[in-house]
Image (spheres, rainbow, N blue to C red):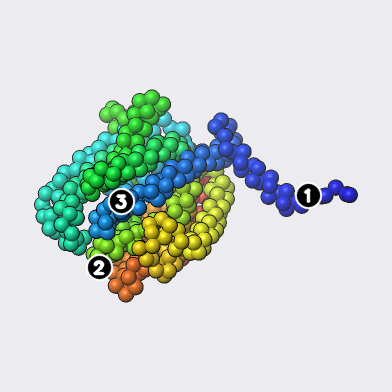
Amino acid sequence: MADRVPDPATAGFVDRWVDRLRVLRLRPFDETTAEGRAQERHRRAALSALAAALSKALSVLATLVSIPLALAYLGDERFGIWSTLSALVLALQFADLGLGNGVVNVVSTAFGARDTAALKRYVSSAAYTLLAVCVVLGLMGLVLLTAVPETAWAQLFKLKGAQAQAEVLPALAVFAACVALAVPLGLVQRVQIAMQRGFIASLWQCGANLLSLLAIWQATVWQLGLPWLVLALLAAPLLSALGNALVFFWRSDRELKPAWQHVDRAATALLLRTGASYFVIQVAVAVVFASDSLFIAHLLGASEVARYAVPEKLFGIISLAVATAVGPLWPAYGEAIARGDLDWVRQTLKRSLLMAAMFSAGATGLLLLIGPWLIGWWVGTALQVPASLLLALGVWKTFEGVGFALAMFLNGGGLLRYQVITAWLMAAGVLAFKPWLVLQLGVTGAPLATALVYGVVTLLPLWWMLPRFMRQVRSRGASSASGVLA
């Protein structure tokens, strides 16, 4: 029998994947050539994505286990408060005034230029500024919780049970304290992400997820109440961030340890300017993402939040997976633009968009088929979830996945003005449209309104503007390659 001749197309496909898998190694590539720098970016991005995937997998596991525990122990009303606060934690990342994202931008550029002096100035200036923000947030939280009576908080969540009314204020106090402390402790993670060492932060987060799950389980076993469950959820990431900061700044990268003598007025001003743009974007995004649970709780009652929150967390795995995969590209784009490696930027953007679209759509289709069975297995058959809600969540998460891939390019390229405009247009559209749709369609109206507004206001205009943005990035890259940092 004659030897079988391999198909050239198949052989080429296999060779491309073999080349991509070669970047999965601990030893760095030689960065003296453009090809070596491209391979090193892919290596760091791959390691960061794998470590983040492990962290997110543990986070999903913790969610899968903790939600039935919390729902069974707390009941509908108190679980609605707990679920709303857990959603607000993610939305309130703007509490650092956007400085964390500003750190990623400026540090990744300085890292790409190999400017150690600039790195010291940015890190120290950010550390002391974030510490000041923490103090201000703590005082604001104290004043707010002291001034607003407990009955007002109960009315906000439409609470009827006496236990829920008694525990809502202490739970909010724990929440406010943890949010304030997270502001300065989050610096180390942002610096590591900017230096394309996000895998270190992700490994620390793995420990935080396991610790949080253990704490939630113990709080339910000992029946400690809602405030302790909020603390169990939020304290573990703070302890993890503290340990990471001590090891990073006092052992592995001691030259970057925050010091007052490295604080620089110009560096602080640049951080504040860049952070201000991100702050505006994050506030608008918080309105969009956190408004679902708040609108449902206020318009339909806190007990209806569970009907929305459980399938939302299931479909949230799609967004989590895409964000994990494309997240490391943000600092990689910034470093590549600073070095003038624009072909790598263009090719990576195309691949990431294709990957995000295909994965989001495929995962959505799968969850539409098996979602009802998964939810019944997860929390029991008592929670009835309409099929229309699953479909609306699937459309929204598909749009969101594509948006993540585009946002990493815009962030890395410093293209913030467009994001500021569209984020606030989207927030305005959501605030105007979502309450009406929730009243008309129930819980289904929340994700459906978000998806419709996001598609019209953000995705369609961005697709038309993308060639222009690519030209702007190419111009910036040419300036950076000539020795002028953007």
Whole-number angstrom distance, CA of label 1 to CA of label 2? 63 Å
- Do the residues bearing badges 1 and 2 touch, measured as CB atoms within 8 Å? no
Can you see residue 75? yes
Where does residue 478 sit, x and y in percent of width and height? 51, 45
- Residue pointed to by mark 2: 299
- Seen from the viewer's position, the closer of residues 16 and 97 is 16
Q: Secondary structure at mark 1?
A: loop
Q: Residues within 10 Å of mark 1 (few under 14, many from 20)?
A: few
Q: Is residue 380 above or below residue 229?
A: below
Disc marking residue 70: 3
Q: Earlier in the sequence, mark 1 or mark 2?
A: 1
**Residue type, mark 3 in image:** Ala
Task: Identify which residue, 263 or 163, lies in the foreground.
Answer: 163
The part of the image, by quadrant, that contains residue 200 is top left
Q: Residue at x 39, y 69 (%)?
A: 386
Mark linked to residue 6: 1
Identified by mark 2, the residue type is: Leu
Specify the quadrant of the image occupied by residue 417. Answer: bottom left
Element on which disc 2 rests? helix
Which residue is painted at 41% across and 55% down in the image?
378
Q: Nearer the viewer, mark 3 or mark 1?
A: 3
Q: Residue at x 45, y 58 (%)?
A: 374
Say left or right for 149 vs 228: left
Residue 427 lies in quadrant: bottom left
Identify the residue at the far right of this view. Answer: 1
Tell me the element at label 3: helix
